[in-house]
Amino acid sequence: MKILVPIKRVPDADTRIRVRADGSGIEDDGIKYAVNPFDAIALEEAIRIREARGGEVVVATIGGGECAEQLRNGLAMGADRAILVNTSDALDSLAIARILAALWKREQPAFVLMGKQAIDDDSNQAGQMLAALLGVGQATFVSKLELAEDNSTALCSRETDAGIERVRVKLPAVITADLRLNEPRYVSLPGIMKAKKKPLEEITPADLGVAAASRTHYLRYEAPPRRSAGVRVATVDELVDKLREAKVL
């Protein structure tokens, strides 16, 4: 059974983000990049399934040559091989989904397992768009995944505002991982050494027969306004008065 795991290169969650003075983007200097945390969770789940049932885990990303670092991390975690779809274009969710759809048709995986969203743009769209383009089922925000014995279906526990929803999807399908699905393993030194010998293929969107272009464009970035300093109160009555002044009560 082959599982395709798309991952994204994003700024590390502990990195301080600074907007450029002209609002054209974020400052690159001093930023540490990492695998999107939700994608790392998806990759961990795929590796666990491979360890229990056999098969192959293919990790893929779309971006420039600098993304090879995150692919190597995926290989060090335990993925069998990696694919870099090399492009310097800034792509929106639909363009990403189109490239992933073409990659799906080339790889023919049993299913796609990916993070529910990326922590940089928080779009939460690529997985759903990919399923729509392929015409296959989808299960999003999955916190527990159970495959049938014959790998024909997947029972997914989804986290919703109303609680846990359990749905069964027929494979092939697109499944997106939520935070509580698992805790990704640490990359070990032996894993890093093994990753150097694993195949990392580099292709372009044109190799997949895709001319993907974004339909949405960012006009300007702005940092959120600074929060004003808080006020220390001495009593509960004073707190209530302050809340009434702020029209919270």
Image (tube, helix red, strand yellow):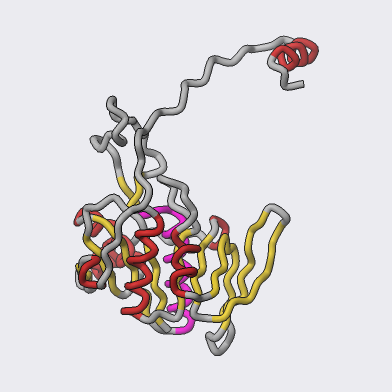
- Farthest right residue in view: 237
Q: Residue at x 33, y 53 (%)?
A: 214
Q: Residue at x 37, y 81 (%)?
A: 108
Residue 122 x/y as whole percent: 47, 47
Residue 6 x/y as whole percent: 38, 64
Residue 101 against residue 235 in the figure, above or below: below
- Farthest front residue in view: 215
Q: Is residue 74 magenta?
A: no
Image quadrant in which the N terminus is located: bottom left
Give the extent of the magenta segment. Answer: 35-53
Q: Is residue 49 magenta?
A: yes
Residue 95 x/y as whole percent: 35, 59
Front residue of this view, candidates 154 and 32 = 154
Give the quadrant of residue 114: bottom left
Front residue of this view, candidates 54 and 228 = 228
Give the quadrant of residue 51: bottom left
Q: Residue at x 49, y 75 (%)?
A: 135
Residue 181 x/y as whole percent: 55, 62
Residue 152 against residue 214 in the figure, above or below: below
